[in-house]
Amino acid sequence: MTPTTVPDIATLRIGVLCGGDSPERPGSIASGEHAAKALADAGLTTELIDIAETPPSALADRIDVALLGLHGLHGEDGKVQGALEVAGMPYTGSGVLASALGMHKPTFKNLLTFAHIDTPHWTVIDPNISTESTLSVVRNTLGYPVFVKPSSGGGSLAAGIAHDEATLRRMIEATIHDPYSEYMVEEYIPGIPCTVGLIEANGRLVTLPVHDVESKNAFYDYEAKHNPDLRIEHCPSILPATATESMQYIARRVFRMIGAHGVLRVDFMAGANGRVTVLECNTLPGLSQRGNLATMAKAGGIPYPVLMQHIVKTAFTKPAYLP
């Protein structure tokens, strides 16, 4: 892809790609619908496209740019990005490499460790290693409680806390029935979940205000993320400035570390003891008008329709070569 001057997006046919076959399909549909409506309401030519029905290879004569509202496997992990590269279709957000690095949590956490950025200790549940061996590793290196989640997934789907070895054993044995191929066990950090958004706007990278949330469930799970009655949110965050400024600084480091482009959301846990630790990052954060990215943008003075237009423009500001 060669660098181009950002065109007048009013002249473009914008395809909002969503859906697919990921376990996170419902959230992706919501992202796509909200983004498409905001762009259409702004007078832009917009089409909502479910990639489960229309593959990227069939888009060349239909749209001029793809806004990615995809989440999870086969959408957020670099595969669709690669297909769009091959098709010569401009698309929003990060390229293939950053998407893959951000999606695969063990690889991402290895990069954090090499960069001396705090992240909870972890081990991967390897299906080729016995459950007893995994339990032994957890017992001797992590202790309890621990957090179990897919190595490549989001939305807190198929994730949960194990407070003891018997519970972890059951969770490990249950992973073979879930759609994800690999899981990980992570040190459990009690605290306040926080997130920081970054968005390219008018030629510069803007770091948005920190968003924090208190979940009424055992953790900030899928239910709490989709039911506002089960959470209390603050944006800007009410945490001390030392913590929020640290998160914003680290979020910018993460952006550069993985080679992200255009937009990124970095998730943290703010521990009660003052520890600030990176949990994961999202190269395609949710685009719903009620989602975290839109909430942070609003707190930063960027209205939702303008946010969507900034994201569309990121398709045309990539360097000449982006891995």
Image (tube, rainbow, N blue to C red):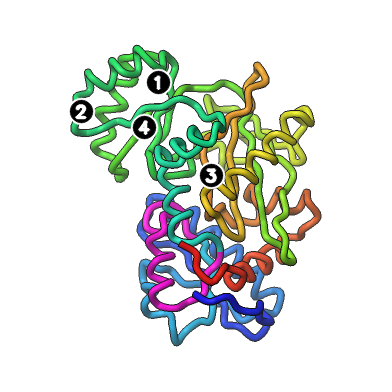
Q: Is residue 119 left or right of residue 233?
A: left
Secondary element at tag 4? strand
Q: Is residue 140 magenta?
A: no
Q: Residue at x 37, y 58 (%)?
A: 74
Q: Predominant secondary structure in magenta?
A: loop
Q: Earlier in the sequence, mark 1 or mark 2?
A: 2
Type of the residue with mark 2: Ile
* Residue type at tag 3: Cys
Location of mark 1 (residue): 162
- The amino acid type of the residue labelled 1 equals Ala
| Circle 4: residue type | Met
Q: Which residue is mark 4?
A: 184
According to the picture, the residue beneath numbered tag 2 turns out to be 129
Question: In the image, 156: left or right of 52?
Answer: right
Disc 4 + disc 3, Cβ < 8 Å: no
Counting the numbered discs, the total is 4
Q: Residue at x 74, y 36 (%)?
A: 245
In x, y percent, where is residue 244? 73, 34
User: Magenta segment, which residues?
Assistant: 70-92
Residue 253 coordinates in the image, percent (x, y): 62, 43
Q: Position of residue 247 (x, y in %)?
A: 67, 36
What is the CA distance from the residue labelled 4 to the residue labelled 3?
A: 16 Å
Q: Quadrant of residue 225?
A: top right
Q: Nearer the viewer, mark 1 or mark 2?
A: 2
Contact between marks 3 and 1 (CB within 8 A): the answer is no
- The alpha-carbon separation of the residues under discs 3 and 2 comes to 28 Å
Q: Which residue is mark 3?
A: 281
Q: Earlier in the sequence, mark 4 or mark 3?
A: 4
Q: Are dots 3 and 2 in contact, CB under 8 Å?
A: no
- Measured along the vertical axis of the image, is residue 55 above or below residue 241? below
Describe residue 34's horizontal placement relative to residue 101 as left or right: right
Q: Nearer the viewer, residue 16 or 249?
A: 249
